[in-house]
Image: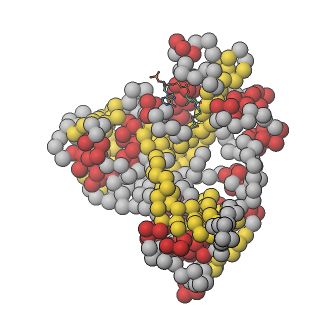
């Protein structure tokens, strides 16, 4: 226990103090601190298998932390076991005394002990988690499409009848039925995607509301191919704005959109841009190489409104992480991985190629020296070792090693995590 947190008690949260834990969480997240029975029931039902812990001062919860089992899709499609971290908060009266540091080190040690390969989170602020060995591993991009400038033919039916597909409006119950199978198809094809349990669909269709947020039912549209396969779905809401000249100025805001074929993706974006009264479409949090802008005759109609780090990864087991992914080219690389927390550091020989990879501890001289957080940013293939070397965050022990690492580790499709958790 650190000196600054010596007076506090750190422990798993029992069901009888869940209400107090939620009060602390909601306070830390600047939401009304009132906790209702409905929210408690929703918290218990959402994300089964959660590990809920807290910091307690004289019996009152002052810090919250929750983790749950998750799988992350590696480059190549394998599902890698991870410790997903969420609900991190410390009351403003107890901040900067080492509370988060203690909750985090307890959780990461337990995850390592269980055999999780990674820990993951979505960071509220960029500067919180690097110190614990997390590195940003995926990026999200949000576009706003000015429909009138998109070049799409507003008179055309959607989807294009030549495509043979169909779009149907459905309700939340239908989404809960067909969503999991659609997501199961997406996951192995999308590096950076994470597993969802059934409760994800309940929270995201308003059945469970653990934070008590207001819910207004969104619209749901589903794309079915000519042979009646569900290949895509979208959830969106629209606002209600009119110009002084009584012309519609409505924005459709996408909550989430999943597609497993380019045809579905094209049809759903075209559908959203074709809804009468909608003059602007906000895309929601998409992959930075989403097809969207280039699906429009004039891609400049889609302007980027947000671009930010998204999924952060902490590698707990370098060998299993590097062996879990695939490699398009062949090569060998010795990595000297520093880990101040002592969880995953060491010198490793990665010998990889299209037929498979092995990663073993080695005494051979290193090609690259880097922190475990930097390795996390490289693992999903999005970050460049050469770029990190220019920043001084990766050190080349042999000339050209960073370029060699890029040739081995970078991937052609950018990773994307569709979920906020
Ligand atoms: C996965 C998620 O749940 S993301 C949500 C994170 N939660 C929030 O942002 C809610 C509002 N913020 C908080 O509740 C708290 O400020 C927390 C949880 C971010 C940090 O908790 P604390 O107990 O204050 O952190 P702790 O004292 O362990 O800080 C450890 C170090 O991180 C630094 N740090 C902590 N938070 C931040 C921050 N937001 N920005 C920059 N540095 C930070 C501290 O200064 C400290 O540095 P030091 O060791 O050099 O002194």
The residue located at (38%, 30%) in the rendering is 339
Number of numbered callouts drawn: 0
- Residue at the front extreme, as displayed: 245
Quarter-wise, where is residue 183 in the image? bottom right
| Residue 245 percent location from the top left of the image | 66, 71
Asked whether residue 314 is in view, the answer is no
Quarter-wise, where is residue 341 in the image? top left
| Residue 80 percent location from the top left of the image | 49, 48
The residue nearer to you, when weighing 155 against 86, is 155
Asked whether, in this view, residue 75 is left or right of residue 337, the answer is right
Colour convention of the picture: secondary structure
Q: Is residue 237 above or below residue 157?
A: above
The residue nearer to you, when weighing 402 against 283, is 283
Asked whether, in this view, residue 122 is left or right of residue 29, the answer is left
Q: Is residue 196 above or below residue 62?
A: below
Looking at the rendered image, the quarter that the N terminus falls into is: top right
- Residue at the right extreme, as displayed: 37
Looking at the rendered image, the quarter that the C terminus falls into is: top right
The residue located at (62%, 58%) in the rendering is 255
| Residue 263 percent location from the top left of the image | 52, 76
- Residue at the left extreme, as displayed: 399
The residue nearer to you, when weighing 18 against 48, is 18
Asked whether residue 286 is in view, the answer is yes
| Residue 399 percent location from the top left of the image | 16, 43
The residue located at (27%, 37%) in the rendering is 392
The residue located at (62%, 25%) in the rendering is 92
Q: Is residue 232 above or below residue 341?
A: below
């Amino acid at each position: 226990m650190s000196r600054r947190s010596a007076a506090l008690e750190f422990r798993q949260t029992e069901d009888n103090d869940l209400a107090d834990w939620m009060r602390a969480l909601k306070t830390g997240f600047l939401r009304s601190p009132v906790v209702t029975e409905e929210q408690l029931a929703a918290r218990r039902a959402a994300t089964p298998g959660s590990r809920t812990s807290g910091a307690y001062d004289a019996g009152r919860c002052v810090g919250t932390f929750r983790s749950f089992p998750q799988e992350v899709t590696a480059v190549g499609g394998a599902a890698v076991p991870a410790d997903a971290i969420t609900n991190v908060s410390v009351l403003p009266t107890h901040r900067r005394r080492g509370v988060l540091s203690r909750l985090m080190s307890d959780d990461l040690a337990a995850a390592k002990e269980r055999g999780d390969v990674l820990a993951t989170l979505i960071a509220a602020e960029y500067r919180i988690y690097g110190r614990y060995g997390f590195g940003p591993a995926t990026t999200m991009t949000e576009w706003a499409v000015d429909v009138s400038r998109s070049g799409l033919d507003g008179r055309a039916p959607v989807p294009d009848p030549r495509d043979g597909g169909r779009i149907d409006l459905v309700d939340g119950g239908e989404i809960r039925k067909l969503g999991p199978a659609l997501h199961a198809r997406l996951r192995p094809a999308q590096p950076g995607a994470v597993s969802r349990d059934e409760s994800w669909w309940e929270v995201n269709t308003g059945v469970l509301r653990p934070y008590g947020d207001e819910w207004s039912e969104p619209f749901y549209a589903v794309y079915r191919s000519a042979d009646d396969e569900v290949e895509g779905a979208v959830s969106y809401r629209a606002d209600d704005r009119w110009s002084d000249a009584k012309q519609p100025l409505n924005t459709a805001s996408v909550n989430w959109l999943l597609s497993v074929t380019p045809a579905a993706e094209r049809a759903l974006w075209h559908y959203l841009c074709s809804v009468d009264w909608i003059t602007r479409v906000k895309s929601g949090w998409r992959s930075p190489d989403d097809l969207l802008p280039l699906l429009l005759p004039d891609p400049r109609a889609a302007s980027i409104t947000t671009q930010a780090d998204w999924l952060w990864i902490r590698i707990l087991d370098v060998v299993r992480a590097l062996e879990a992914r695939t490699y398009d080219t062949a090569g060998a690389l010795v990595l000297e991985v520093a880990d101040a927390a002592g969880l995953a550091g060491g010198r490793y020989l990665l010998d990889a190629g299209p037929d498979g990879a092995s990663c073993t501890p080695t005494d051979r001289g290193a090609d690259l020296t880097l922190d475990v957080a930097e390795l996390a940013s490289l693992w999903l293939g999005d970050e460049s070792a050469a770029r990190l070397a220019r920043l001084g965050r990766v050190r080349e022990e042999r000339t050209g090693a960073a370029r060699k690492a890029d040739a081995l580790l970078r991937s052609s499709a950018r990773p994307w995590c569709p979920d906020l958790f």
